[in-house]
Amino acid sequence: MYRYDEFDHTLVSERVSQFKGQVARRLSGDLTEEQFRPLRLMNGLYLQLHAYMLRVAIPYGTLSSTQMRMLAHIADKYDRGYGHFTTRQNIQYNWPSLDQTPNILDELASVEMHAIQTSGNCIRNVTSDQYAGVAADEIEDPRVYCEIIRQWSTLHPEFSFLPRKFKIAVTGASTDRAATRVHDIGLQMVRGSEGEVGFKVIVGGGLGRTPIIGPTIREFLPKKHLLSYLEAVLRVYNQLGRRDNIYKARIKILVQSAGAEEFAAQVEEEWAHIRDGYLQLPQSEINRIRSYFAPPDYEILPAIDAEHALKMSEVPEFASWVERNAVAHRQPGYAIVNISLKPIGGIPGDATVAQMEIVADLAARYGLDEIRVTHEQNLVLPNVKQAELFAVWQKLAQSDLATPNLGLVSDIIACPGLDYCNLANARSIPVAQNISERFRDLERQHDIGDLKIKISGCINACGHHHVGNIGILGVDKKGVEFYQITLGGRADDGAALGDIIGPAFSYEDVVDAVETIIETYLAHRESDELFNDTYARIGPQPFKEKLYAAH
Amino acid sequence: MPLIKNDQLVDDPWYVLDDEGAASVSDDADIVVSYERWTKDRESLVSRNGRLGVKLSSDQPPSLIEDDLKHLDLVAVEFPRFTDGRGFSYARLLRERYGFTGEVRAVGHWFRDQMVFLQRCGIDAFEADEDRALVEWSEAQREISVVYQPAADDRSWVSRMRSSASRTARYQAAE
Ligand code: SF4
């Protein structure tokens, strides 16, 4: 994992003092709320429906056990005993008080964490593949470049007042687990013609009101030019992105209106001026940062542990958890463990103080001290010995963290919605809970198989509903909550946006509608076809007929 | 309106000319005109004795005046709202792309906590209407001592300091 050096420490602690000063100016009335707003936003502090919300950055979703323990401590001391992991691999606290936030930031700084640029119209926390560094299909660990981007973008003097927020995702694997095609910039590590590693650059994807699968504007970017090329993209956007209409201000609108080719040409033109300048990445700096992400000292172990195999045959519950939630590791004898934050009927992404502490303990004891946060709002222990899976499972199960539902219908992504968010049209969390309850029978879930349900409480699409196999969007109809359903979306390699199936459903009817969709899928499924494949084959008509027959 | 320049609060020696006229301004006065006026009255403006500045509004990129910079001693970059960050790029382009060494002034709406960013982008004069501005300016200067990226100022950024630190370390180790 990356460790701060003196420079990183200095910046974060100075930033905390700066924010302390800003809060003091606000509390003394020196700053009005209007003046304070941009300042608090630059530090991840939102004013929500009921209280302030603090969003803490978890750069590229990687945490140590010490950091996780600190997150638990903050939830305990300054909040109501829980935190909420988000689709941006961050954590949000929903109830801090304004005067305490500098103390929270102080405590975070002590474990090399911060809330810098988790909101505002700037370059946000960079996200990545939750299996970075341990995935079998990886070209290189993308976190090295995430960290380089994190540093370059931190308090960037030119790009802190962009037309709109700006999100970058990086993946190093052939399977895209970072949803790079729906980010402002998506970077995929690829090999060039001579086998050298660089990036494919995708610009202008995104969800929200105008969902767009981002086009590729450069097939291959050598690593040393990473920052100058990003700077060129941002500079074009900062000058030409729309500022007259908040809904048209994201870079995707600029790329669409100019055309991807024309936009790429503008970037190349800007880049030509700066590519050989100061931003060229010295190999020494790449190496320095890479050394922090060097693989841990794995033990040489047999591919199959005999004791583990025995437990698998003896304890069916354990076996079903391993089959669902554990993933092949590239090191023989190790496994990647997914910890579901989606217990049946629970709030997606919420974790209590006790749960965070358990995860921290397990990471320290069995997981080479590493934890990941996924954009699907679960946690990961990326380095667990096969022989210790049983012990880990037992501990997780005691804390309601072992639901074997990774990727199943109850593994739902949901935004905070009307329970917290002042932009919401409708509740998301209770819809997720109701769906989860409806399908509480795990055998039924396994029978349905992989299926992604994603729920947003408004068109801003924080719950990524456009790329859910079943997407649910809260809309407001004359002051009443309704839910529009889309089918056939996906966020991975074959990224696609779902199609609206028909008129929206009421809060009372939406769970029935989801069940009807799933029953229709099962009735038409051929062998082990996935939901999207059946949908692509039979089209929307059979679903429409069932859904709207009675209406 | 007074100015913050070189860490001091000073009187503004420049006279802002509106688009219509003010023929009464003496030939020796230093004047700032809009880009529109500059394109219209270029000949007569260049033949004056006084120094000349051009103000760019936020949708006028400095590429428009790239070839004119040799006639200018000042470029004013407008911030119509503090959220409109185009001027940050314009200032950097003026300094880094076009090598402009005259005054680059921020006019319009920006707030204390943006001053260091503006300065890093190459702005060296700020219109300031309160005495407090100078205090705020010096406070803001001291808040963050570390920068992670090169810009139009002469501060050394972290990755460069790291590599020179490791060079020194290697050097010392070799001794
Ligand atoms: S999608 Fe809408 S309701 Fe949900 S968190 Fe985002 S802004 Fe709020």
Image: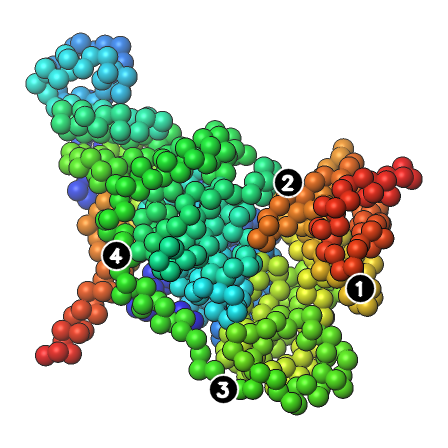
The one nearer the camera, B35 or A448, is A448
| C-alpha distance separating marks 1 and 3 | 37 Å
Task: State the mark number for residue A459.
Answer: 2
- The residue wearing badge 3 is A300
Quadrant housing residue A321: bottom right
Q: Chain of mark 2?
A: A
Q: Nearer the viewer, mark 4 or mark 3?
A: 3
> What amino acid is labelled 2 in the image?
Ile
| C-alpha distance separating marks 4 and 3 | 42 Å
Residue A378 coordinates in the image, percent (x, y)? 62, 64
Task: State the mark number for residue A402.
Answer: none
Residue at 26% over, 37% down: B93
- Is circle 4 on the same chain as circle 3? no
- The residue wearing badge 4 is B157
Q: Chain of mark 1?
A: A
Q: Nearer the viewer, mark 1 or mark 4?
A: 1
> What amino acid is labelled 4 in the image?
Trp
Q: Is residue A86 left or right of residue B81?
A: right
